[in-house]
Image (cartoon, coloured by chain):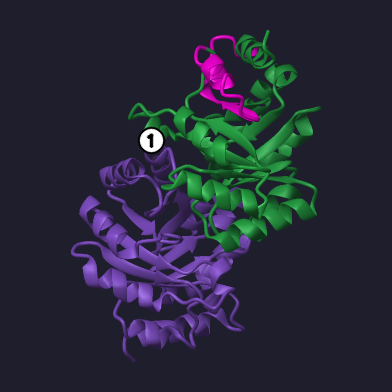
Chain colours: A green, B purple
């Protein structure tokens, strides 16, 4: 089981500082969509150049011109790039193709997908590396959580790895880890903790079953 | 009927140069998603500061954290911001609220929406300023066009304005203008023309019925 830190609400220099602080305990550092929108792909490049072993995920939430967008993200150093599960099949396929051509991975974000089971089966067949169930900020505000969606997706996929995101914190990560996803994504639960390094270590320990 | 130039595949300085060249003939200049991803919102700011009368649209294709993203785009000078029609209702509503609070407009991009008629009715009721039918790059490559979708949306909305995008060129704009949308979005048809100013003037003349 891998742990990903999602960084959404900082500038790229602060994001690097946070990532370096917790790198010992996380497998993947995500440059979140808000940072990409605010500062562009140079934020991904800076993160890649600033980390040692952790992978860098660029949360582009691609919707169109998918092959091009993946190639750009890869050029700027991304190891994993995200596309939306609601995107057209042709976009998903060209994104997967472009990522794999470069030895990189594609994560499909299932946010706002209406028929999770059907779409997960399709994405699994298309060759998505990760399928991520994701309760976004705007639905977290309505009290929703991604656990049931995680079970649904996990029960139907054969080759893809399953990731889970949406409001997961040190206090709640045990219940998520118990479902045995391949990747758990934690954002504010680490980034906004009083001691982010401690919060990341705690999440790591839970994931490692300590 | 308004005319929008969508600029996708340049850097922000080249985008400004192109926009200034054609500003006499267009109502709205769009900073396309690829520019936002590559360079971030400073590209929107530079465009806003470089134009006189044309509005600036930031094609963020928002999917989550919608109120925050709209406020960021507005801070950087956007007059119109885009959100995806496939986004959750809670995201669309907070985006509309944030845009209107600032006296700005929201355009909902219908790319990959499966039930256009149903979604258009919902978005119209939520108060979307523009509903944009949009055949993306990846489906244009499969030979699709947005004209039929335009008719579908136009037939059901009451208050929203309707926009149309996707591979429209000087050679084809007459057939689009004949459908009488509120906004026609042209990208490569102007940007990649041998003489972009002439192409923009031609599009303007068609729209004005000259």
Q: Which of A26 and A12 is in front in this view?
A: A26
Tell me if residue A201 can be seen: yes
Estimate the x, y position of residue B7 in percent, counting from the top left.
54, 65
Q: Is residue A149 above or below residue B58?
A: above
- Choose top left, top right, bottom left or bottom right for residue B93: top left
Residue located 35% across and 68% down the image: B163
Give the residue at the far bottom of this rendering: B210
Residue denoted by label 1:
A138
Residue A73 vertical position relative to residue B67 in the rendered view, above or below = below
Quarter of the image for the N terminus of chain A: give it: top right
Q: Nearer the viewer, residue B94 or A150?
A: A150
Q: In which quarter of the image is residue A160?
A: top right
Q: In this view, does A106 lie above or below A178?
A: below
Q: How many marks?
A: 1
Q: Specify whether residue B210 is painted magenta.
A: no
In the rendered structure, which segment of residues is drawn in magenta? A171-197
């Amino acid at each position: 089981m891998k742990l990903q830190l999602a960084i959404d609400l900082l500038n790229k220099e602060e994001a690097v500082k946070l990532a370096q602080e917790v790198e010992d305990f996380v497998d993947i550092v995500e440059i979140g969509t808000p940072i990409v929108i605010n500062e562009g792909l140079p934020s991904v490049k800076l993160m890649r150049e600033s980390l040692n072993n952790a992978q860098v995920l660029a949360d582009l939430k691609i919707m169109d011109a998918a092959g091009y967008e993946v190639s750009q993200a890869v050029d700027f150093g991304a190891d994993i790039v995200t596309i939306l599960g609601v995107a057209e099949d042709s976009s998903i396929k060209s994104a997967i193709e472009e990522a794999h051509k470069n030895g990189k991975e594609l994560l499909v974000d299932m946010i706002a997908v209406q028929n999770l089971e059907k779409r997960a089966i399709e994405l699994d067949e298309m060759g998505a590396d990760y399928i991520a169930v994701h309760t976004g900020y705007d639905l977290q505000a309505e009290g929703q959580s991604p656990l049931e969606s995680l079970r649904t997706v996990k029960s139907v996929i054969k080759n893809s790895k399953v990731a889970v995101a949406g409001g997961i914190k040190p206090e709640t990560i045990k219940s998520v880890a118990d479902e045995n996803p391949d990747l758990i994504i934690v954002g504010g639960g680490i980034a906004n903790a009083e001691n982010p390094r401690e919060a990341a270590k705690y999440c790591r320990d839970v994931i490692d079953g300590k």
